[in-house]
Amino acid sequence: MPWNRRAFTGRRLSRAFNIADLRELARRRVPGFAFEYVEGGAEDESSLRHNRTAFERLRLLPDTLIDTSRRQLRTTILGTPADAPLVIAPTGLNNMLHPGGDLALARAAARRRIPYTLSTLSTTRLEEVAARAGGRLWMQLYVLNDRAIGRDLMQRAAAAGYEALVFTTDANVFGSREWDQRNYRAPAKPTLRAALDVLRHPRWLYEVLLRNGIPRFRNVEAFLPPGAASAVGGSTVLPGMFEASISWDDIAWIRQFWRGKLLIKGVLSVRDAERAVALGCDGIVLSNHGGRQLDYCVAALDVLPEVAAAVNGRLAVLLDGGIRRGTDVVKALALGAQAVMLGRATLYGLGAGGEAGVARALEILCTETERTLGLLGCNSVAELGPRHIRRD
Ligand SMILES: Cc1cc2nc3c(=O)[nH]c(=O)nc-3n(C[C@H](O)[C@H](O)[C@H](O)COP(=O)(O)O)c2cc1C
């Protein structure tokens, strides 16, 4: 790095200026195996890198001399007002990063009046999140090979008042994150090196493992064979559980148990977006699963313009993958997304400092998005459009 610049070395959340600073703080606070689980992508990690390149290729084109003193981020997501065009994406094993991770993410989202999506593979029961965090809750559905699991989850989420179901469709086969697998010598058995690294993080060891016990897949543990519910080594235990037979016919199956709003997460083509419209879905999430499933996959941002044009407002188009800056949020909205989902950005906040860290991540992204709006000559996200974007 030139002259005297260096990476963030602080500990205070208020001194973390951006998501990269929170990432650095999280990297130091959690053991390597847990950070690797968050960070990694499939195979050559080309999809993972491309999710960032896709944003970096786009330039912003501002209008000047516009009165932007009334800037604000308020918007509508799935027909309900939200304070910002953000949704926290579903991620499994959150309690591995911080005790009470799911609750911390859900509470920080509720305070910002944005939705939180709880994963099927969460480490807190969906009823507990509803009772102790509140706010707008969405439930993510993986259809696992025992279909009774999905049925149970949908019925419980409906009873607990979840607003929307997010059916993840890009995990019919489990992606291969090789760096993650290298941390285990056998399913759920960390290598000696990974275990020794845990000892170098005594605070994490005490707070996460010793005081609360190894996180477990609380939502689905009743259905798992003995020993399989422990979340250590998740990616070595789970591959066999994903259901390869899922298809568009399953929307009718889902509709038997779920009457609330329905989003399909994992759509990347106009053809599939049209199918979701035809089946009466309320929204789609353009996503390549944060680069964790298919490698060399297009980025959601690459296909957003064509999908948004084809859908033409018939359902909500959300996008995720690589959102790290307010400028990223603005680019996605300008090209037609109603909101973006945050995966790693808020997980870095969680690892850096629990609920306060997630709140800091959201604060950073909201501040940056609002600043970007102003610099573009806009007062609200509704004013954004493709004319604000140029391709490099
Ligand atoms: C650690 C981790 C766990 C994830 N777990 C799930 C999951 O349980 N269900 C799901 O639909 N997507 C899951 N995803 C994908 C995210 O929902 C989201 O699509 C992705 O993280 C977006 O990319 P980003 O991390 O670059 O923001 C996970 C992603 C990460 C990083």
Image (cartoon, rainbow, N blue to C red):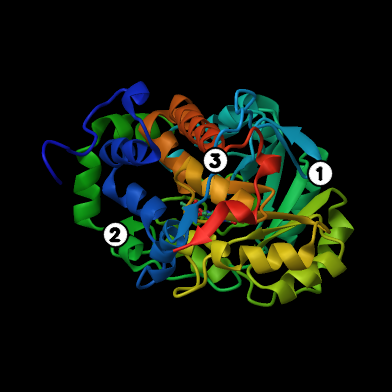
Pointer 2 local density, CA inside 10 Å: few below 14, some 14–19, many at least 20:
many
Q: Amino acid at mark 3?
A: Leu
Under tag 1, what secondary structure? helix
Q: Residue furthest left?
A: 3
Residue drawn where x is 33% and y is 58% of the image: 189
Q: Which is more N-terminal, label 1 or label 2?
A: 1
Image quarter for residue 108? top right
Under tag 2, what secondary structure? loop
Give the residue pinned by disc 3: 376
Give the residue pinned by disc 2: 183
Residue 314 in picture, x, y percent from top left:
83, 59
Name the residue nearer the viewer: 304 or 33.
304
Relative to residue 351, is residue 82 drawn left or right? Answer: right
Q: Which is more N-terminal, label 2 or label 3?
A: 2
Q: Amino acid at mark 1?
A: Ala
Residue 334 in picture, x, y percent from top left:
62, 51
Q: Can residue 192 be seen at all in this image of the molecule?
A: yes
Q: CA distance from mark 1 to mark 3?
A: 41 Å
Image quarter for residue 286? bottom right
Pointer 3 local density, CA inside 10 Å: few below 14, some 14–19, many at least 20:
many
Residue drawn where x is 52% and y is 66% of the image: 299
Q: Which is more N-terminal, label 3 or label 1?
A: 1
Under tag 3, what secondary structure? helix
Q: Amino acid at mark 2?
A: Asn
Where 371 falls versus 276 (above or below)? above
Give the residue pinned by disc 1: 158
Q: Can residue 160 be seen at all in this image of the molecule?
A: no
- The nearer-to-camera label among 3 and 2 is 3
Residue 155 in picture, x, y percent from top left:
80, 48
Name the residue nearer the viewer: 208 or 83.
83
Where 48 falls versus 334 (above or below)? below
